[in-house]
């Protein structure tokens, strides 16, 4: 029986980064994801200097710089656009050595992570993991090929559950989430905007919109920038 050192479930930012870091430490791994390629919808748009440092450790610092830009802060406004609160960030390096707030587009980051996977990482798409079973000494990961319906399994020394919010891995180990009672309804919208921003936000070094988050307290609409197109989500 062949045993893979590590099976990573999920090829989102967490799984791809973990696989890259493992490979850089000489650990082979197999990454399984239910989708064939990058999930195209925009989601995360911001990461901080600590995560930037992790990406740099994975060898992607310069490439991430080319698809991201420093965020100049966050401004909360009411329905009359009166400023309720704001804080500023900037392009100065924080204590982790990188700007403290950075805007990016999640699919673009995932493409970058996929393109830079070391050769000791095998990424298999269209693989829906259906069960994780602890055997004596190994973990059996069962999955179904979404294109053919064929069922397979692989034995691993370790399994990393990087399978997102509705995690099968989490359920498999019996971990639960505590409901903190958050009941707000959110709507995330992509819109096209001019690449300039009102107010006294400084111009960004990349010539892009200086990228504040604009948050209206009602009706829970949120606008955050996306790459050079000037779109915001
Ligand atoms: C609408 C929306 C807006 C968001 N906006 C923001 C934002 O503004 N800022 C921010 O920081 N974050 C935002 N997020 C959250 C952000 O997308 C997540 O924090 C991020 O994707 C987490 O990365 P991850 O790699 O841990 O998980 P994911 O990106 O969820 O990746 C998990 C991967 O596991 C795969 N997978 C899951 N189950 C299985 C299975 N059984 N078999 C095989 N593969 C499986 C999935 O296909 C997926 O590729 C948003 C999310 C959504 C949905």
Image (cartoon, rainbow, N blue to C red):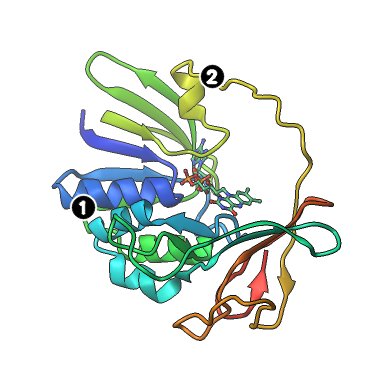
Task: Name which of mark 1 and mark 2 comes first in the sequence.
Answer: 1
Q: Is residue 156 left or right of residue 36?
A: left
Task: Tell me the quarter of the picture where residue 216 sits.
Answer: bottom right
The residue most toward the bottom is 207
Any part of residue 158 in sight: yes
Q: How many marks?
A: 2
Q: From the viewer's side, name the closer residue of 182 and 171.
A: 182
The residue singled out by tag 1 in the image is 120
- Write the residue at 76% across / 46% down: 186
Q: Residues within 10 Å of mark 1 (few under 14, many from 20)?
A: some
Q: From the viewer's side, name the closer residue of 72 and 1.
A: 72
- Write the residue at 28% across / 61% down: 97
The x, y position of residue 231, in whole percent, is 66, 74
Q: Is residue 93 left or right of residue 162?
A: left
Any part of residue 156 in sight: no
- Write the residue at 46% across / 69% down: 70
Q: From the viewer's side, name the closer residue of 27 and 216.
A: 216
Q: Nearer the viewer, mark 1 or mark 2?
A: 2
Q: Quadrant of the image for the N terminus?
A: top left
The residue singled out by tag 2 in the image is 176
The x, y position of residue 71, in whole percent, is 51, 67
Compared with residue 206, is residue 16 higher up or lower down, i.e. above or below?
above
């Amino acid at each position: 029986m062949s045993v893979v050192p590590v099976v990573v479930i999920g090829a989102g930012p967490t799984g791809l980064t973990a696989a890259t870091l493992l490979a850089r430490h000489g650990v082979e791994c197999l990454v399984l994801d239910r989708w064939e390629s990058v999930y195209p919808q925009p989601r995360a748009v911001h990461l901080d200097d600590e995560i930037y440092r992790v990406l740099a450790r994975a060898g992607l610092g310069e490439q991430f710089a080319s698809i991201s830009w420093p965020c100049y802060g966050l401004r909360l406004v009411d329905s009359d656009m009166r400023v309720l609160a704001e804080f500023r960030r900037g392009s100065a390096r924080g204590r982790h050595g990188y700007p403290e707030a950075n805007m990016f587009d999640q699919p673009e980051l995932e493409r970058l992570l996929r393109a830079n996977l070391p050769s000791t990482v095998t990424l298999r798409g269209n693989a829906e993991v259906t069960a994780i079973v602890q055997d004596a000494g190994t973990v059996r990961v069962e999955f179904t090929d979404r294109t053919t319906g064929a069922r397979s399994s692989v034995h691993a020394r370790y399994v990393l559950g990087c399978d997102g919010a509705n995690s099968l891995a989490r359920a498999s180990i019996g971990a639960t989430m505590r409901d903190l009672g958050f009941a707000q309804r959110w709507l995330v919208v992509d819109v096209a905007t001019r690449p300039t921003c009102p107010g006294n936000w400084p111009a960004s070094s990349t010539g892009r919109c200086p990228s504040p988050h604009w948050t209206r307290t009602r009706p829970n609409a949120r606008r955050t920038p996306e790459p050079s197109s000037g779109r915001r989500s």
